[in-house]
Image: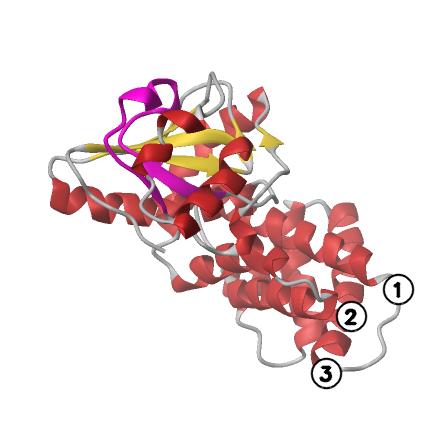
Amino acid sequence: MSIVGIGSETFLYVNGISTTHALQLADDILLLPINTELQFDNVSRLIPSDIDYSVAVLCAPNISSQLRVTSKNEETLGVVAWNAQWDCLLLGALFNCEVMCNLQCDKPIEKVSDATYFYVTNYAFHGVLKNVYVLTEDDESWLNQHYHIARSLLDSDIYLTAVHAMASYRWHSIPRVQLAILWSGIEALFNVSTEISFRISLYIAKFLSEQDDVVASEVFTKVRKLYNARSSAVHGGKIKGDLDTLVFESAQILNRLIRRCAESGQLPDVNKLIFNCI
């Protein structure tokens, strides 16, 4: 993967998520809608190789939004643009979808005919996304209120692990591996080393229930079943239930945990959760 820093502004063309309004993700990163399809003929002259041309042809029709990245100088622009790829992963984790930036240009899509450079940033097959998550008004409101908190939590290796597991589990085609990845993200948030099945189910139930005992009971039962499936998946045992359903439900749990952390402004505090269980 490669990102360039030229000038004080650059655009990352994004697959996988769509917005109808400009959303400020950080002081120097703006998620923008696209109002027209990429006119590929306008930038084909700028593509340096046949391989890049092939990747761009695959990605271009599925661009659904764009990130405007700004900085005071070229040196820091490259760094900010590189780190903006984490914003794609974070958006994917928050909305349980795949988000990837595959192309970089010095102009927004609407002005691509004036571009002076056009580069491929991602050569991985999982970067070619056709499914698009369309942000609703409620989603945009949630982002305006909580995204900056979620972004700040990425400074923690624990939250970083959870987000990356959530954002990347679909890159693997085997459900057992997907379960293992999802649960590595879930377990990272709680750091349970003894009586794992019971404790992690109890802590997740308390963290997600907001003191509602009925909800907590339902979550506890579901999580314990899913954790048992995770254990069978990791150790090669026979798994009860449909694997795809188990992956889907595990992803829902991790997604809820990641969002709950952002909404509460903190990572799970096991000591407090233990006290709430007494």
**Dot 2: within a 10 Å radius of its alpha carbon, few (fewer than 14), some, or many (20 or more) residues?**
many
Left or right: where 27 falls relative to 172: left
Residue pointed to by mark 3: 235
Secondary structure of the residue carrying tag 1 is loop
The answer, for residue 109, to whether it is visible in the render is: yes
Question: What are the residue bounds of the magenta stretch?
Answer: 100-120
Three-letter code for the amino acid on which mark 1 is drawn: Gly
Residue 163: numbered disc: none
Quarter-of-image position of residue 135 = top right
Residue at 22% x, 49% y is: 79
Q: Nearer the viewer, residue 193 or 10?
A: 10
Q: Is residue 222 left or right of residue 258?
A: right
Give 16 or 117, whichever is nearer the viewer.
117
Q: Secondary structure at mark 2?
A: helix
- Looking at the image, which is closer to me, 155 or 82? 82
Quadrant in which the N terminus appears: bottom left
Type of residue at label 2?
A: Ala
